Image (cartoon, grey):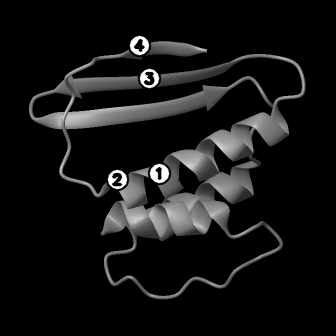
């Protein structure tokens, strides 16, 4: 379900990168939401575009949340070791930081 997406939202991100990001986030949501809802939103506020993909799947463990939060917060862009998880979310995080 697409909840809200303004027709005139503009960003400075390449279409190719945005496509990869959305593909991975939506793919993860579909894989992990057997029954439930997936919500996609885009909003613009104070010259910032906020894109959200949310689902009612089981979610990530606290350990996974901490790992990905550290990866996103890393200012040095050091390499984080890939774990058993697939490459999609780490790739999305790296693309968002560019």
Mark 4: few, some, or many residues within 10 Å (few <14, many ≥20)? Answer: few
- CA distance for labels 3 and 2: 17 Å
- CA distance for labels 4 and 1: 18 Å
- Give x and y (percent) for residue 30: 77, 35
Instruction: Tell me what residue is drawn at x 88 percent, y 19 percent.
Output: 35
Work out which quarter of the rendered image holds the C terminus and state it. Answer: bottom left
Residue identifier under label 2: 15
Q: Which mark identifies residue 41?
A: 3
Residue identifier under label 4: 4
Say whether residue 40 is left or right of residue 60: left
- CA distance for labels 2 and 1: 6 Å
- Give x and y (percent) for residue 13: 26, 54
Q: Secondary structure at mark 1?
A: helix
Say whether residue 87 is left or right of residue 51: right
Mark 2: few, some, or many residues within 10 Å (few <14, many ≥20)? Answer: few
- CA distance for labels 4 and 3: 5 Å
Q: Nearer the viewer, mark 2 or mark 4?
A: 2
Residue identifier under label 1: 19
- Give x and y (percent) for residue 2: 53, 16
In the foreground, 79 or 5: 5
Instruction: Tell me what residue is drawn at x 59 percent, y 48 percent.
Output: 23
């Amino acid at each position: 379900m697409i909840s809200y997406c303004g027709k005139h939202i503009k960003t400075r991100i390449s279409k190719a990168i945005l496509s990869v990001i959305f593909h991975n986030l939506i793919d993860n949501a579909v894989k992990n939401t057997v029954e439930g809802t997936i919500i996609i939103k885009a909003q613009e506020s104070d010259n910032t575009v906020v894109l959200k993909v949310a689902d009612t799947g089981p979610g990530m463990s606290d350990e996974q949340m901490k790992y990905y939060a550290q990866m996103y917060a890393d200012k040095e862009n050091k390499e984080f070791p890939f774990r058993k998880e697939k490459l999609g979310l780490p790739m999305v995080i790296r693309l968002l930081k560019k």
